[in-house]
Amino acid sequence: MRLPYRAFVALVRAAAYSVRQPQTYQVSASFPIPQPSTLASSLACAAALADGGPEGVLGDAYVEQLAKSILEVLVRATAKPVAPLTSSSVTVSRVRTLESSSEEVVKSIEKGRRISDAMVREYYSGRLALIYIFKDTIDASKVLSWLYLIGRIGDTESLISLESVGEASLEPLGSEGFVDTYTPLEWVESYGEGIFSLARLSREELCIKVLRKREDYEKNSSIHIIPLAEKDVGRERRILEASKVYVKTSRDYLIWKVEGAGVEANVVLPGGEAL
């Protein structure tokens, strides 16, 4: 049987990364693991570095065309911790210089005035497996060239280091079983055993939009089952570990085993009825 998908895994190490929860402000809480739109955006950025990106357009139009080219071949993007994730004590206070002229900034510094505001971010650190599922028509060498150029996940300061990249094997496991990657709630018929939380995450297609309205976020996001367990280590630090949750998928979805780049994960994908 010819498989309908091709899977790829990038194993990364992040000293400090922040994926801001869209509905937070000033003191910005971060998602512990990057949401689907974040992963799709990182891939699109890497594809632009590898292939040059769309020509003849700038600004929002450039981002839209670039993201569309990725979404045409991408089926799913998800992630799994492969080591404990820790919330970091690192915070970043934004310096407001772009809104002022350089002369005004210099004068403010000379007079001892603050040129920063109260915008701070929460950061996490750890090792993550970034899992990308593509249509079976994708050129593997092209995808690998993209993955090798992923340099950040999240905000500008969230630089990552690649440990390994590779194509992964795929094996259908059926409609019931444990999954250890986040899954849209609407894709499952029931769920229960395991340690998990429910949270609203932005879907892959949000990478095509410039997020300026709350309505855009709500339209392109959905509740996900997130298999993460928090270790009890006191109030000073928060440590999260990968967990598993038992699900029964909806009619048109199946659980697949993904194995590659030294990582093994169970992922829910569309196509249960056809298989």
Image (cartoon, helix red, strand yellow):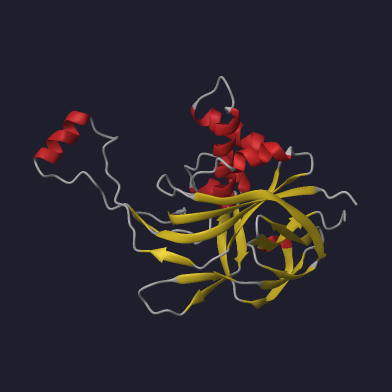
Please name the residue shown 51% across and 31% down the image.
Answer: 60
* Residue 49, position as x, y percentages in the image: 55, 33
In this view of the protein, which residue sits in the foreground, 55 or 7? 7
61 is higher (above) or lower (below) than 205:
above
* Residue 177, position as x, y percentages in the image: 76, 71
Q: Residue furthest left?
A: 111
- Residue 72 in sight from this viewpoint: no
- Residue 176 in sight from this viewpoint: yes
Q: Quadrant of the C terminus?
A: bottom right
* Residue 1, position as x, y percentages in the image: 91, 52
263 is higher (above) or lower (below) than 110:
below
* Residue 263, position as x, y percentages in the image: 65, 60
Q: Residue furthest top?
A: 56
Apparent side of residue 197 relative to residue 71 in the rendered image (left or right): left
Q: Quadrant of residue 111?
A: top left
Apparent side of residue 207 relative to residue 75 in the rendered image (left or right): left
Q: Quadrant of residue 173?
A: bottom right
In this view of the protein, which residue sits in the foreground, 103 or 188? 103
Q: Quadrant of residue 228?
A: bottom right
In this view of the protein, which residue sits in the foreground, 259 or 40? 259
Please name the residue shown 59% across and 72% down the image.
Answer: 196
In this view of the protein, which residue sits in the foreground, 58 or 125? 125
